[in-house]
Image (cartoon, grey):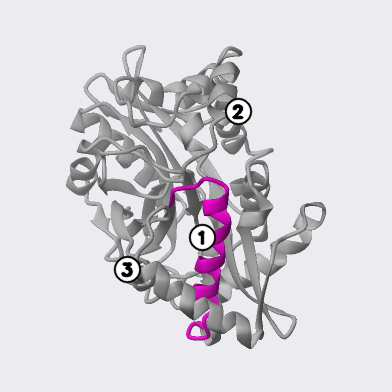
Amino acid sequence: MSASTGSLEVRPVRTARERRLFLSFPWKVYRDDPLWVPPLMGEHRAMIDPSRGSFFKHGTAEFFVAWRGDRPVGTVAAGEDTAITARQPAGMKEGVWGFFECFDEFAVASALLDRAKAWCRARGLARMAGPFFLEREDCYGILVEGRDRPPVLLCGHTPPYYQSFVERCGGVPDPMESLAFEVRLDEDSKEWEKVGRMAERIRRRGWITLRAPIRARWRDEVPVIKELLDKALAHLPGAMPWQPETVEALMRQFLRIADLDLILFAMVDGKNVGWFPGIPNVNEALIHADGLRFPWDWASLAAGMLRRPKCLSVKSILVLPEFWRSGVAVLFFDEMRRRARAKGYTWVDLSLTGSENPFTPDLAARLGGRVYKRYRVYRIAT
């Protein structure tokens, strides 16, 4: 089956050559965009491979290229996370769309999204949400504000015309925007002084302790983190239990670049009640590495990695709801600031958090933080 508009065709990826074209197409779209961070080609090759990609352990997907004659002009993926749809009622089942890239031509965008809708509709999925790199926490949404700097680790960067294209194709934005906050570490302020005083009082009480993971036993932390993710985020609209494979894949990715001194767990009476992972923003080096498509790109990456990133990215502030007012988050931030400043970091990125999250936006504001990027996820009826 293919969608067509004149000489425009959208065809599924079938051959090794077509997979290469699918993965390399973003380089054409962002050729003149200095803020784009090229994805690592090897990681994306594994990501779309059913025998290796973590998504395929709990879902299925297909990948498409839009062609005008013999020229590729766009890409899209459609998928179903069967672990999620199995828990959704009939008539409300939701697929995902992603890997959406095209030039500034609405006809191409429309044909791509029509093809993704047809794929989802054939599987009884009433709508599809995206864009993602299939996994819902990877390259989340369309950038609608904040094109003055490159994205950080696991955040996306999209052309300004994508928003209008998706909305013209029937995309309805999730009412909860996804926000990235900037919190300065290198500036002394009354907010940080207050946090320091509160943290010191909590330390003196001695009932909350912090620990770092042990690298050799990182797999033991996967069920701990999954439990914290499921329970700490259960209050959010549409929250679903995380898949163990997804958590393990994220941990494996983080551990390649992580400084374990900056990944903190909080414990009360021997129980894990919170997780606060600070990850070096390696995008500061990867922006110069061209996705490691060619052997000489490794030299650019090595040169970039010699300079410690200035940004520490925090992807989750997980605290069990019964401990929200206990001071765990205050202790996390104060300890992280002490450790990160000593290592030369100048700011923390908190991304991504929902605008309706009752916890993180308020906490970021109390630290003098500001929103510096906004993303939107769109749902499209099939």
- Residue 277: give x, y in percent of width and height: 58, 58
Residue beneath label 2, please?
A: 42
Give the quarter of the figure containing the N terminus: top left
- Residue 11: give x, y in percent of width and height: 41, 27
- Which structural element holds mark 3? helix
User: Is tag 2's residue or tag 3's residue first in the polypeptide sequence?
Assistant: 2
Q: Is residue 229 above or below residue 33?
A: below
Query: Pointer 1: residues within 10 angstroms few (<14), some, or many (20+)?
Result: many
Amino acid marked by disc 2? Gly
- Residue 341: give x, y in percent of width and height: 52, 53
> From mark 2 to mark 3, how far is it between C-alphas?
38 Å
Q: Is residue 149 magenta?
A: no
Q: In this view, does 37 lie above or below 257?
A: above
Residue beneath label 1, please?
A: 337
Q: In the rendered image, which quarter is residue 369 located in?
A: bottom left
Closer-to-camera residue (289/15): 289
Residue at the image position 56 percent from the left and 66 percent from the top: 335
Residue at the image position 52 percent from the left and 50 percent from the top: 135
Residues at circles 1 and 3 in contact by the CB criterion of under 8 Å: no
Residues at circles 2 and 3 in contact by the CB criterion of under 8 Å: no
Q: Tell me: 25 left or right of 172.
A: right
Residue at the image position 60 percent from the left and 67 percent from the top: 275
- Which structural element holds mark 2? helix
Q: Nearer the viewer, mark 2 or mark 3?
A: 3
Q: Give the range drawn in magenta.
A: 324-347
